[in-house]
Amino acid sequence: MLDYKRTDRIGALMQREISDILQRQIKDPRVGFCTVTHVEVSNDLRHAKVRVSIMGDENQRQNSMAGLKNAAGFIRREIGQRLSLRYTPEIRFIRDKSVDYILTVDKLLKEIETEYGKGARVKKLY
């Protein structure tokens, strides 16, 4: 059986609540389509790294990150009201680039498929 740490449980709760806050309460036009992918809470529960995936071009992503950083205090206050914790973690938003990486790999695979054809055998290089 997995042994979940308290920080993991609080991170999962924060992920759900922050996603809800972003969807329902943040009215900043700079914040575009964002998805909270992971929340990592420090062992002392004082700090939280919130990883977000942001859709759009680079300018839209930068604007969204600026809007999220601007709303961090509001989001922290909302988290404090929703979760009964002794300390509400200080929130730091970090852009999650894993979705960008997945899209790049998918694009490369599609290029290979169009170049060599679907189901083509590729010679092993090792």
Image (cartoon, rainbow, N blue to C red):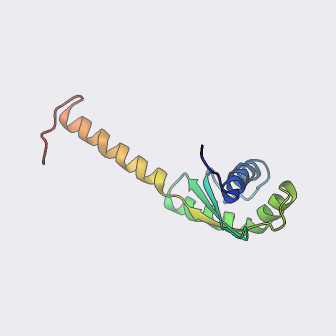
Q: Residue at x 76, y 52 (%)?
A: 21
Which residue is the extreme one toward the front? 1
Q: Foreground residue, 17 or 86?
A: 86
- In which quarter of the view is residue 74 placed? bottom right
Is 91 placed left or right of 80 in the picture? left
- Place of residue 58 in the rendered image (x, y in percent of width and height, measured from the top left): 50, 61
Q: Residue at x 24, y 36 (%)?
A: 114
Q: Foreground residue, 80 or 97?
A: 80
- In which quarter of the view is residue 69 placed? bottom right
- Place of residue 54 in the rendered image (x, y in percent of width and height, measured from the top left): 57, 54
Depicted 36 relative to depicted 95: above or below = above
Which quadrant is the N terminus positioned in? top right
Depicted 40 relative to depicted 120: above or below = below
- Place of residue 108 in the rendered image (x, y in percent of width and height, measured from the top left): 30, 46
Q: Residue at x 83, y 56 (%)?
A: 83
Which residue is the extreme one toward the top? 119
Q: Residue at x 75, y 51 (%)?
A: 17
- Place of residue 15 in the rendered image (x, y in percent of width and height, measured from the top left): 68, 52
**Number of numbered labels in the structure image:** 0
Is 125 placed left or right of 79 in the picture? left
